[in-house]
Image (tube, helix red, strand yellow):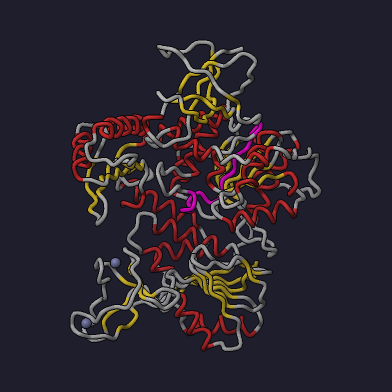
Amino acid sequence: MPSIAAVRFASPLPQLDREYDYLIPEGMSLVVGSLVEVPFGSGKKAKSGVVVELKELSEHKGELGSITEVLSLHPQTSAEVLELCKQVAQRQASTVGELLTSALPKRFIRAEKNLIPIPAFEQLDSEGTSSLDETLLAAKRVHYTPELISEGDGIPNWSIDFARAAARQLIAGRSSLIILPDYREVRHFELALEKLGLTQHSLRHVSTDTGSSRYSNHLRAQMSHAINFGTRTACFSAIRDLSIIMLWDDGDESHIEQGSPYWNSRDVLLQRQQIEDTHLVIASHSPSAESLRLIDLNYLVASDANGTKPLVRITDSFTRLDDETFALVSKRISDGKPVLIQIANLGWASAIACSTCKELRKCPNCQSGVWIDPAGMYRCRSCQQSDLLPPCSCGGTNTRPVRIGASAIADQLRRSFPKTTILESNGDNPLISTSASGALVVATPGSEPDVVGGYDLIVIADAAQMIGAPRLKALERAVGSWANAISLASKQSLLIFVGLSGVIADQIKELDFKSIVSGDFQDRLSLGLPPSTRVASVISNNQPDFILFKEGLEKIAIVQRLRFLPSADKLSLILDYQYSDGAELAQLLRSLANSLTAQSKHKKPGERVYRINMDDSKVI
Ligand SMILES: [Zn+2]
Ligand SMILES: [Zn+2]
């Protein structure tokens, strides 16, 4: 029986980022993952931590304290997930303690009393196999493109394919982990589980669920074999006999942790696949540039389900609803068929100009652009100020919209089709599904609702604007959002793309999303932009500490290009580096940040002096 336990604390503080050894009192039984109470610091204050290793010898010089108490009979995590936290911390230049806060949900003592195990699963009611199943027989890591158009029952093909692949593992007595971008896809996956009779064999891990239900499912995942699914934090759920990991829509921004340490589902799951030696499936309707890179490197085997594709019409005028499109919309509506119009910008107008001098109006507070939100209020793009606009510098008080948004389009359509139900869905107020037959839906990218039977006509009205946006991932994100919107079409649907020409028009005609993203990826490769290289950022709140960090960085040879990003409220440094230098650079940045933090004369108590983001795509 080992006599010493190494303990870690779930804390982002760099000074606590190490393992502390404690003696195990005679008769106390512990496993890796046990939650314990220990005396800590000079005052021997009681502190709870998690056991990360059991051993015979300690390298600690001096007397060891003893573990006071085992707080829960249930292990809170697994050795594999602890190893994952360690590796992710290294990759992200972060601390293990910070990641433990994701891996360990809050404890609810009452939930420990009635943990119901998951019943054994023997066989699927309905037979059937997908090309995903076939590829998994031969390959460990797969990139999967499911059939685009579903049966019209509101259950997307990928969710059925994922559920089936998970069920196969369950029959063999093994568990699965499915990571989804948002609540909407969680709902889709639940519908697939229901359809295949798998609901009672599944465990949901969603951060917005109640704490006690999350905690209960967290423990049950370690007790029984199950289909585990959830949003990005579930990447760190400890799972019994995990044998397959599946990730849906890895390019979706919801997969990126927005605060430090800024990890993303794809990179964490790639690390987890290695640690637990599982199968890995990354799937989406349109690939991310990062997965194309992995396919290029033969790290992922590509599998494509193909299937029927709807008819495509392309207009080369920039009019969102030209006469012909308007006539097609009108015809569908009078036939009682549902229509979807995707509009890129939310609200009434994406910018406004002075009617007198034609100048674009700016925020009186910070001089950024202003737009008109869905409530019809002026809003600043940067400081979010929302108030009445003072008169223009020319004295003019009237304004006109520069580009009208989804609310204005919906309003115009209400006037054109007074008898039709016109629905609006956007990121602020998403509509998950509608059963209104013959509804006309105006939605912003990513918030298109499902409709029974599928849409009969889908208009991608801002196709040209979306691909022309001055952002690194504009094209990839645009195509991804089109593909997801189109997946809601019926098999007889017509798709209209507005304002496309040239090569992209030809590729869209075939709905060949992969070629479009691949071309974009090749362009980025030749320009030395991500994902073939990586771009990190370091933020600091005060000038003196910022300067010290910059001086430290200038001595690091593997930093290829170092530059500043001026911003109103913070100081950032941007640096480019090669993929192969990632581990070394993360280590260097982390020790630089730690040593400068320790010396800082400007930090307030408990303040984080530096925030490091190892992959900051927002800065390009
Ligand atoms: Zn003016
Ligand atoms: Zn402002």
Tell me if residue 6 comes above or below residue 172 in the rendering: above
Q: How many marks?
A: 0
Q: Residue 20 appears at what percent x and percent y?
A: 46, 22
> Between residues 509 and 320, which one lies in front from this camera angle?
320
* Of 185 and 570, the residue lying toward us: 570
Q: Is residue 563 above or below residue 500?
A: above
Residue at 34% in and 46% down: 525
Q: Residue at x 63, y 31 (%)?
A: 72
Residue at 46% x, 30% y: name it. Answer: 86
Query: In terms of image quarters, where does ligand 1 lie?
Result: bottom left
Q: Which residues are magenta?
A: 240-255
Q: Quadrant of the N terminus?
A: top right
Residue 308, located in which quarter of the rendered image?
bottom right
Residue 175 versus residue 169: which sits nearer the camera?
A: 175
Q: Residue furthest front?
A: 43
Q: Is residue 404 left or right of residue 481?
A: left
Q: Position of residue 284 (x, y in %)?
A: 55, 52
Horizontal side of 62 relative to 589 (left or right) equals right
Answer whether residue 61 is magenta in the image. Answer: no
The answer to whether residue 135 is above or below residue 182 is: above
Residue 559 coordinates in the image, percent (x, y): 26, 36
Does 242 appear in magenta? yes
Q: Where's residue 465, x and y in %? A: 38, 68
Left or right? Give the position of 419 relative to 446: right
Q: Residue at x 31, y 30 (%)?
A: 591
